[in-house]
Amino acid sequence: MDRAELLAAYEQMTLIRRTEKAAHDLFLQGLVKGTTHLAAGHEAIAVGASAALRPDDYVFATYRGHHHALARGATPEECLAELMSRATGLCRAKGGSMHLTKASTGMLGSYAIVGAHLPMAAGAAWSARLRGTEQIAVAFFGDGATNIGAFHETLNLAAVWKLPALFVCENNLYMEYTPIADVTAVARPAADRAPAYGIPGEVVDGNDVDAVHEAVARLAGRARAGDGPALLEAHTYRHFGHSRADPATYRPAEEVERWLKHDPLDLARGRLVGLGVPPETVAAADERASAVVREAVEAAKAAPPPDPDQALTDVWADGGAAWRT
Amino acid sequence: MADVITYREAVAEGIAREMRRDPAVVCLGEDIGEAGGVFKTTVGLRAEFGPERVWDTPISEQAIVGAAMGAAMTGMRPVAEIMFSDFLACCWDYLANEIPKVRYMTGGQVTVPLVVRTANGGGLGFGAQHSQATENWAFTVPGLKIAAPATPADVIGMMAAAIRSDDPVVFFEHKALLATKGAPPPPDHVVELGRAAVVRPGTDVTLVALASMVPLALKAADLLAGEGIEAEVVDLRCLVPLDVSTVLASLGRTSRLVTVEENPYQGGWGGTLVSLVADEGFALLDAPVRRVAGECVPLPFADALEERVIPTVDKVVAAVRDVAAY
């Protein structure tokens, strides 16, 4: 990434971090119901990968997916309005935190059944190949998903069909509350499975936006050229617990401290300064991101709730919900 | 085209007709390509349309249906085969949580125009894990359309409607009907989903049936006619959309209702149909409603045992006699 690209990535990561912080605060204020699975700490994976993709590539994410929606063009206002059950929400308040989707930009959903979206990404890649569009499909998933059947079925199918797909594991060391190492037969839950399917498996520092960008650009290029899928395991750490219900007390203090010192925003900021970007330029990016999120919070708060009758729409393609004639 | 076509041939013909008219239609499933399907319901498709449109898959039901979903969300019209309907359980997440919900939970941002075809039902001695009538499984999930044709012509017409539908359709092909024959329908034959058919008029009792239960109900009706009981037989064709209007109209003529369901009584589709009749057609009834359905046990292997569990002509005749005599 050159200076301009890195600065843009930094600003986008900051925007995601501020949005996640706002989601956290709004929950504590009683304005977000249900639960949230915040991606603070994971920003570099979404932003680095997105910068390496074409605008028409497909992205599939998990219930921890706010960063991917934002990286693929959803606005903080749309996302926060969705979390706050507003009519102006990204999914018109029908999805909530776990299902942020921006189909118009190819962000084809956030799925809350672990691993379920990997076959979908394979299918989108298959579709791209059949239509000859040279698009690729990327599935982002957690380390926990590497132990579910759909992961293995998908990798085999994608390898056999040589699909233009990329599978990016966000390994944050914990499958929900349990260390992934305690429940996984191999040390690197994604990358070490790649040889079983005859595809490349790599590990990258998921907090280094430049490194993620480089790896995704290379593996995406390979997939786009018809050389088949790959697995990328990006190591990262969540700043919050698994979900709202989880204070994450099971994580050793030393480990938390070590990872917080390896923060993706700090890393990018340090690199920008090293590249000679003036501190006031970085501060201006921070301020712009803060202002956008501040305004997003106010706009979402002011937005109306959904019309209850909207509950009975959007089941079928005709917009309705009729199940009988 | 030949004068008659089998139900089995009609499946391949129905798919082929749609593949000829729409290049977005592609097929995937286990053994569907070179082998032509374990039930020979996809014979000829690979030869006519090639490997880029007819894809053999590994035994990976989640990958098959999940990939079909991803392809459907991005411009294709996939037709995925799940070899036996019992195996829908292996990819149930897609039928229960993903396919029927993604349009709704994204506020209408995506459509999922796909068909999941599957060989359904018993009577062939395949035992507990290859014989179930699982249409009621799909019926528990809002957001799926459910088709279950009883004749070769309906297979073709309903396949056309299912593939052209912008909504997901689970398409149940009944194993016991594969060898049955009928007249081939004309070109561009489309049977709109959600339109039941009165396949035998009658004045005394309405028999509502689905798939292989339709010919069974017709046999029962013939026997009953010899006793002076005229049964009207309604082929429901689809569970979603459910054609309640046709059933109520029939009850307006007969005032008596017997459902004939292969799925278990417990959770079977007739329970919902009967509840709708109770809500909206109670005044039409002159007798209690009877449901002839599968016994609530796993499907046994031996013929004598299987016949004890699933509906038979004798069971239907007995139920109709009771209702008619009330």
Image (cartoon, helix red, strand yellow):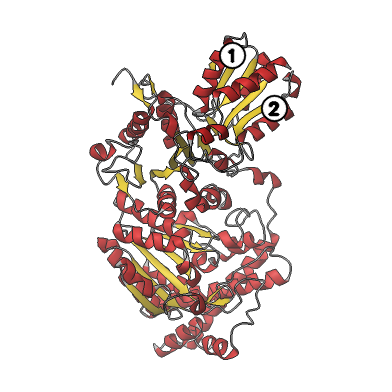
Q: Give the label on residue A175, or none.
A: none
Q: In which quarter of the image is the C terminus of chain A?
A: top right
Chain letter behind tag 2? B
Q: Residue B317's spot in the image, x, y percent? A: 60, 20
Disc 2 element: helix
* Image point (55%, 49%), residue name: B96
Answer above or below: position of B279 versus A130: above
- Element type at marker 1? helix
Q: Earlier in the sequence, mark 1 or mark 2?
A: 1
Quarter assignment of residue B180: top left
Q: Position of residue B116 (x, y in %)?
A: 44, 42
Q: Which of A180 and B324 is in front in this view?
A: B324
In the current view of this chain or complex, which residue is farthest to the right? B283
Instruction: Judge by depth and name the residue closer to the eye, B287 or A89.
Output: B287
Q: Left or right of B222: which side holds A195?
A: left
User: Do the numbered discs 1 and 2 sit on residues whose CB atoms are within 8 Å?
Assistant: no
Q: Does residue A302 appear to the left or right of B143 in the view shown? A: right
Residue position marked by numbered label 2 in the rendering: B277
Compute the Cα span from label 1 to label 2.
24 Å
Which quarter of the figure is the N terminus of chain A placed in?
Answer: bottom left
Q: Which amino acid does label 2 sit on?
A: Val
- The chain letter for the residue carrying disc 1 is B
Q: Residue at x 68, y 16 (%)?
A: B324
Which residue shows up at 47% across the image and 36% down it? B172
Q: Mark 1 points at which residue?
A: B224
Q: Do labels 1 and 2 share a chain?
A: yes
- Which corner quadrant of the image does residue B34 belong to? top left
Observer-nearest of B272 and B109: B272
